[in-house]
Image: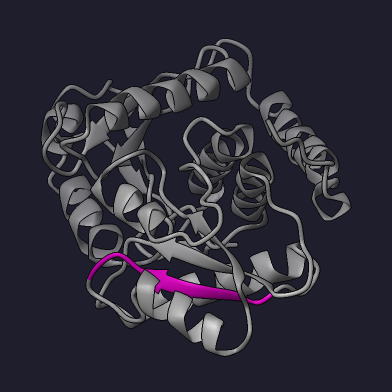
Amino acid sequence: MTTHEPDPTLSSSADLLGRIGTQLGARLRQVRPGTRGPALIAVGHGSRDPRATATLRLLLDRVRELRPGLDARLAHIELNPPLLPDALAAQPEGGAVLVPLLFARGHHVKHDLPAAAAAAPGRPTRTTAPLGPHPLLVEALADRLAEAGWTAGEGTAVVLAAAGSRDPQSGADTRRLAALLGERLGGVPVVPAYASAATPTVPEALRALAARGHHRVAVASCFTAPGLFATRSAAHAPWIASAPLGAHPALARLVLHRYDQALAHTGPTRELASA
């Protein structure tokens, strides 16, 4: 079995996560004893792959470990119970914050979740920005690549495989995430590609990189959990493909960061910033 030395470009994960943990701890100390905030409802897309829901449950377990006492629940936009309207109907009197387990500003984030929040039965419901682009998401992507065997060298590049959307803001978010990941990997080319609804596709991006002389190309899976898009994207990898982000510690911290942003935000929550 081949072993790989740790890539020094990926060594700052612990430092960044430590800083984020300190910030979250400071927020927690501002909460009055005996008070309980709104529920956190993490909203996944839904998938016919049975591994998807199991993976998201593990992510929510990690969120609860980081924030003991927080009422953290899972809901889905389609395909898997509980569906979002059912989760909202069962939300506690203190209301809820919807955190989309999605990485860009597509239709679900900009329309479906705010509409569901507006229809919630008489309880305060906020929606947050998507998880990306954000440095913690970059850390999770870089770590998953390292786990898959990533080493930078001559001819290396990365295809950032995402779900895709017709919304131009979604494409802008994914391109920004690709640029941040490229910086994180020391200037390696990172090309965004999509499993549906947008171009280039993963095979198209791979061909374009090969034409530019990049023959050691990794596919970075920008998906929260296993499913059809993640499986198809990984199958095209000519070298290595990273696993979906799943219950990565940085992703759990990012979910809490979005939740805290929503609680701190005093204005409309429909278009929260992604930073």
Quarter placement of the N terminus: top right
Q: Residue 206 location, x and y as percent? A: 46, 75
- Look at the image and give the residue range highlighted in magenta: 189-196
Q: Is residue 58 visible?
A: yes
Residue 207 percent across, percent down from the top left: 44, 81
Q: Is residue 268 magenta?
A: no
The answer to which quarter of the image holds residue 6 is top right
Q: In terms of image quadrants, where is residue 224? A: top left
Left or right placement of residue 68 versus residue 174 in this view = right
**Residue at point 50% right, 41% down?**
245
Q: Is residue 172 above or below residue 252?
A: below
At 75% from the left and 39% from the top, the residue drawn is 17
Q: Nearer the viewer, residue 258 or 145?
A: 145
> Residue at point 22% right, 27% down?
50
Q: Which residue is most to the front?
A: 1
Q: Residue 89 vs residue 195: left or right?
A: left
Drawn side of residue 60 relative to residue 147, left or right: left
Is the C terminus in the top left, top right, bottom left or bottom right quadrant? bottom right
**In-image side of 232 versus 144 (left or right):** left
The magenta stretch spans residue 192:
yes
Q: Position of residue 87 (x, y in %)?
A: 19, 28
Q: Does 211 sit above or below residue 160?
A: below
From the top left corner, tell me how far across and down residue 225 is, in percent.
38, 39
Q: Give the answer, above or below, for where 271 lies relative to 250.
A: below
Which secondary structure type mostly characterizes the magenta part of the structure?
strand
Q: Is residue 170 visible?
A: no
